[in-house]
Image (cartoon, rainbow, N blue to C red):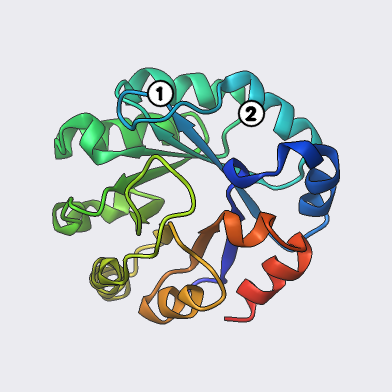
Amino acid sequence: MKKLIISPSILSLDYSKTSEQLKELANSKAEWVHFDVMDGHFVPNLTFGPDMLKGFKKVLPQVMDVHIMVEDAKKYADVFIDAGADVLTFHSEALQNDLSAICDLCVHIRSRGVLAGVSVRPKTSVEPLLQHLDQIDVLLIMSVEPGFGGQAFMEDMLEKVRRAREVIEQNGYSTRIEIDGGINDKTAVLARNAGCDTLVAGSYVFKQDIQSAVESLLCQ
């Protein structure tokens, strides 16, 4: 399994302490930063636009791990690649779980020099995607319903992780398995043991000392 990467979710940043927390994050052992984009339609919340990504990219040295939870995934993939995404993850449901369309968008994202990620909601089966992992750089398993931070970890989502890890190991794929939702020092152990190599953590990181929180997750 690949080296463990922590991707703190900037959605949980304390904006009354923006400068301080960004400095702590920049100096932490987190290699990625997770940037959630919500359009108020695909999920019932509204978050960041491309200008925010450009701003974060100027002050953070980490890989920009952009997760677009939007209806028009094709349009916004390019918008956020242009804004500085290093990893661009879209939802399979945004393309009606159409495997041909999903693979085509992955090819396009990769052609832009960016890692292509595909995410699935808790109720969406991961099985159809497993035969196409050679075209997917990051498989993002949602362990909460997308749209809001602070939800409880759904442990039954780890079965998707185990199945994906099995296929990756059997075929020698380089796909990373990322998990997002309810990650803390305890659930990180469960996720890591199931086969995740990339952990998104929001509240757990930003509601305490950021550098210590990241290090505690890396100890899993």
Percent across and percent down for residue 43 are 33, 32
**Residue receiving disc 2:** 53
Does residue 39 sit above or below 110 in this rendering?
above
Percent across and percent down for residue 144 are 35, 55
Does residue 108 sit above or below 10 in this rendering?
above
**Sequence-earlier tag: 2 or 1:** 1
Q: Quadrant of residue 146?
A: top left
Residue at coordinates 83% horizontally, 56% vertically from top-left?
A: 27
Q: Quadrant of residue 107?
A: top left
Under mark 1, the amino acid is Asp
**Residue receiving disc 1:** 39
Does residue 19 sit above or below 198 in this rendering?
above
Nearest to the observer: residue 69 or residue 117: 69
Count every numbered label the image shows and give the total: 2
Q: Is residue 59 left or right of residue 125?
A: right
Element under disc 2: helix
Nearest to the observer: residue 171 or residue 92: 92
Judge depth for marks 2 and 1 and give the one in front: 1
Under mark 2, the amino acid is Leu
CA separation, marks 2 and 1? 15 Å
Does residue 50 sit above or below 159 in this rendering?
above
Q: Dot 1 surroundings within 10 Å: few (below 14), some, or many (20 or more)?
A: some
Q: Quadrant of residue 202?
A: bottom right
Q: Is residue 197 left or right of residue 159?
A: right
Of the 4 image quadrants, the one containing the C terminus is bottom right
Residue at coordinates 80% horizontally, 41% vertically from top-left?
A: 17
Mark 2 and 1 residues: CB-CB less than 8 Å, in contact? no
Residue at coordinates 27% horizontally, 48% vertically from top-left?
A: 120
Percent across and percent down for residue 152 are 40, 62
Element under disc 1: loop
Q: Is residue 25 left or right of residue 166?
A: right
Q: Dot 2 surroundings within 10 Å: few (below 14), some, or many (20 or more)?
A: many
